Amino acid sequence: MEAAPDVSTEPRLTYKEAGVDIEAQDKALAGASSAIRGSFTPGVLGDVGLFGGLFDPSKVGFQDAILVSSADGVGTKLEVAKRAGIYDTVGRDLVQHCINDILVQGARPLFFMDYAAMGKLDPDVVSALVSGCANACRDNGLALLGGETAEMPGLYQPGDFELVGFIVGAVQREHLIDGKGVEPGQVLLGLGSAGLHTNGYTLARRILFDLLGHELGDRPSELGGVSIQEALLAEHRSYLDLLWPLIQEKRIAAMAHITGGGLPGNVCRVLGDTDAIIERSSWTVPPLFQMMVDGGKLESSEAHKAFNMGIGMVLVVRPDDVTAVRSALEAAGEDVFELGTTVAGSGKVELR
């Protein structure tokens, strides 16, 4: 009878050799833990590392409230971050994009959760991504309550990664903004963006890098000394602190966060049985957008569908509140653009 083979000396396969490094995940979490804890608010129960995040809304003043939630990603702005080797700003982009998405319904953000996935985990990259999220949470008064980091070799190419987030906020019932207050004859006020925010990057990269041949470090004359990298990685603004007092005073009938789809594709979401007439001449399109329109030979309708064109938030305001709203925003240093008005209709946006 043959002796059984001696397997004691045969090489043993490990999870790390298969492509997943659990120790690297632990190192990445450790690198971001202090930033995560720095975002904790009084409503947080527990610490980093629990299976589920715990939050008590009564600790932050919400007793009878409606929860508002949203999820989103950063899109192909991640490709610019990867080329630049700068990873913390897209974490801020993600949080602040999500904050604006629930703010338009009158909600105060309570907590945020992130998800980062890649083919091969780089602890420094993950730490920067998560720290960016945590620091934005801290600055905006919400908690980074939990998240997930996934290493998936074979699904993502080397160097590729994904970053998405989930936000939960609350609004007292009497402060809910649901579009029912929109009527004909109200005024549309626009607030400036800080660039593309987190939308339109696939087209922007095609124009700036492929058609115009720019590199990240280029400083074209059209941008007045700003580099391509600085323009494209400009952070997605949070409008929370700016608009919260006006929300509490019930001076805003509706709000539209201008993301994918531009002004036509987002203002329509809050109009109900009215239409919006927006005058293109009511604000000056920033140089980055004009540069892309010219470089890509874009039709105006296409540009306004792909990009925010310099307007990051639109407020629908009753005529009697316009002066007070403008005064408050301008006192905070904000440029306010009177974009147009609402008229009777069926939820359409007309750019004139």
Image (cartoon, helix red, strand yellow):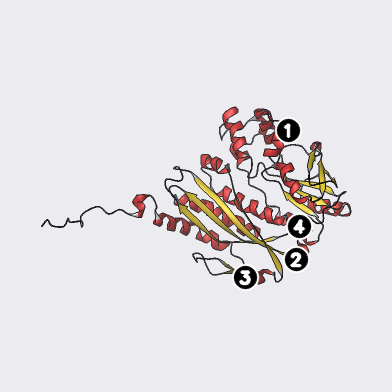
Image position, residue 134 (x, y; %): 57, 57
Given the image, on which type of amino acid does mark 4 rest?
Asp
Circles 4 and 2, Cβ within 8 Å, touching? The answer is: no
Spatial CA span between label 3 and label 4: 25 Å
Q: Dot 4 corresponds to which residue?
A: 178
Residue 153 visible, this orientation? yes
Spatial CA span between label 2 and label 1: 40 Å
Image position, residue 231 (x, y; %): 63, 39
Given the image, on which type of amino acid does mark 1 rest?
Ser
What residue is shown at x 61% (from left), y 66% (from top)? 41
What residue is shown at x 73% (from left), y 33% (from top)? 300
Residue 300's disc number: 1
Circles 1 and 3, Cβ within 8 Å, touching? The answer is: no
Q: Helix, strand or loop at disc 3?
A: loop
Q: Dot 2 corresponds to which residue?
A: 173
Image position, residue 210 (x, y; %): 57, 29
Pointer 2 or 3: first along the chain: 3
